[in-house]
Amino acid sequence: MGLELRQQLKLSQQLVMTPQLQQAIKLLQLSRLELLETVQQELLENPFLDETEVETEVSESSEKMTESQAEEELVRNADWENYLGEFSSTSKQAMAREAEIPEDGLSFEARLASKPSLDGHLNWQMRLSNFSEKEIAIGEIILGNIDPNGYLQASVEEITGMVQASEEEVEAVLARIQRLDPVGVGARTPQECLLVQMEVLEYDDPILVSLVQDHLEDLEKNRYKPLARKFRLSMEDLKDYIDLLQTLDPMPGTNFSSTEPHYVSPDVFVYRYGDEFVIILNEDGMPRLQMNTFYMDSMKGAADKEKEYFQEKMRSAAWLMKSLYQRQRTLYKVVESIVRFQRDFFVDGVTKLKPLILKEVAEDIEMHESTVSRITTNKYVSTPHGIYELKFFFNSALDLDDGSQVGSESVKALIKQMIADEDTKKPLSDERIGEILKERLEVNIARRTVAKYRSAMGIPSSSKRKQYF
């Protein structure tokens, strides 16, 4: 069989993810703070992007422009503030804010003091105390193995392997560290931590010591009656012991934790005005972008290689502004659709939240589900009832007896409210909560479903919620 070369024409379609399309998709799922960082980075890297404080006036003749002329005008005079202004259900004048008057003196950063770390606080105390150089060397190894809660995560044998010292020397240094501030730090168990604090405070009652040494689990699980019988105490006397134990700190290192709070900057504000809701995109701090006219004019006399570079950067700048425009447009449409679907929530609160899925919003705004999923990721909306993530409004449905449905988040809110209002001496069981939901909502919900929702909200069981005093 002979071999031969042939030419063949074949028509096919192929989906290609261009860098510009990848950038547009990435911008959709960025949070507001991440978006600000991205825009600032592009301003630094792309000479064709410029930030201006002068609003671009739109002439009356722009209405008569052709499509190509309008696009060219957008590239040259695009204003980021105008993009945001289009997607606001109130005028720019209504959104005007009074300028904040900066305080005189030092900058804001200069007024902040860094929070001391647990390691630094203990090291400082060791060096101010009469620790020898060898004890300080052992102490530094110990401090390096203390977790944020203040507990030692290495055994004495492991520490002796890290430093040339005997187990007795390590135990002696550890005992001294445990009596530094905060007292009990470096303990290996909760019992040891509390016993050290009791020793320093001179709480030497035998019953109190026995409660800590042998019955912490019973106290945690509210097994008070067996303890009262064992120690021949009344419930009032046992309560006095428990109140005394509650003044101790089982996690002494948490006050020095370096974990910083997570602050949320809402992407959208929804205000109620009469019977309507006003939607405003958060434009605070967002730079207003336009094309740099200096570099655009420089393209005319540039060499071929320079012109190619200029054209690439100009296209990148124009695409970024279009992508930002599309992102804000999509975000506004999605929030507008959510307000329509979840109007009862915006009026009455979480208990009126309806079941909603991405497909319903996608069909409402005529976009793909993946687009709705991306634009609702890491986005927050400020509502009359608090700040919520956009994903919060999408929840599963539970069927009611009359054929209608109720959102799972509404059921969770009712469960949380019932537990908050319960008698702590007779807490509601999961089965009883299910019966109350049946009476109020006419919804058949199993006990295990109630338990699942309760656990998801971090609420303990009825036996752990019960209070005897």
Image (cartoon, helix red, strand yellow):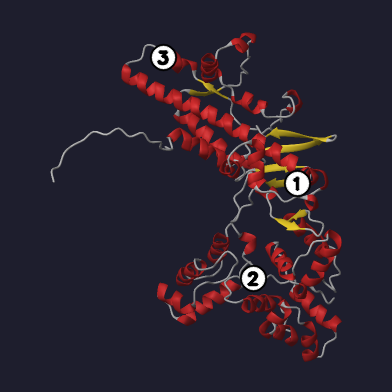
Q: Nearer the viewer, residue 25 or 269?
A: 25
- Residue identifier under label 2: 183
- Residue identifier under label 3: 298
If the image is split into quadrants, where does the C terminus sit?
A: bottom right
- Spatial CA distance of label 3 from label 2 is 69 Å
Q: Nearer the viewer, residue 380 or 364?
A: 364
Disc 3 element: helix
Q: Examine the rendered structure and indicate whether residue 341 appears above or below residue 328.
A: below
Residue kind at label 1, given as amino acid type: Gly
Q: In the image, what residue occupies the spot 75% across and 39% down?
A: 340
Outermost top residue: 61
- Spatial CA distance of label 1 from label 2 is 39 Å
Disc 1 element: strand
Q: Examine the rendered structure and indicate whether residue 38 appears above or below residue 238.
A: above
**Where is residue 230 shown, x and y percent of the image?**
77, 91
Sequence order check, earlier mark of 1 and 3: 3
Q: Examine the rendered structure and indicate whether residue 31 appears above or below residue 273.
A: below
Residue kind at label 3, given as amino acid type: Ser
Residue kind at label 2, given as amino acid type: Val
Image quadrant where residue 419 sits: bottom right
The mark closer to the camera, 3 or 2, is 3
Image quadrant where residue 87 sits: top right
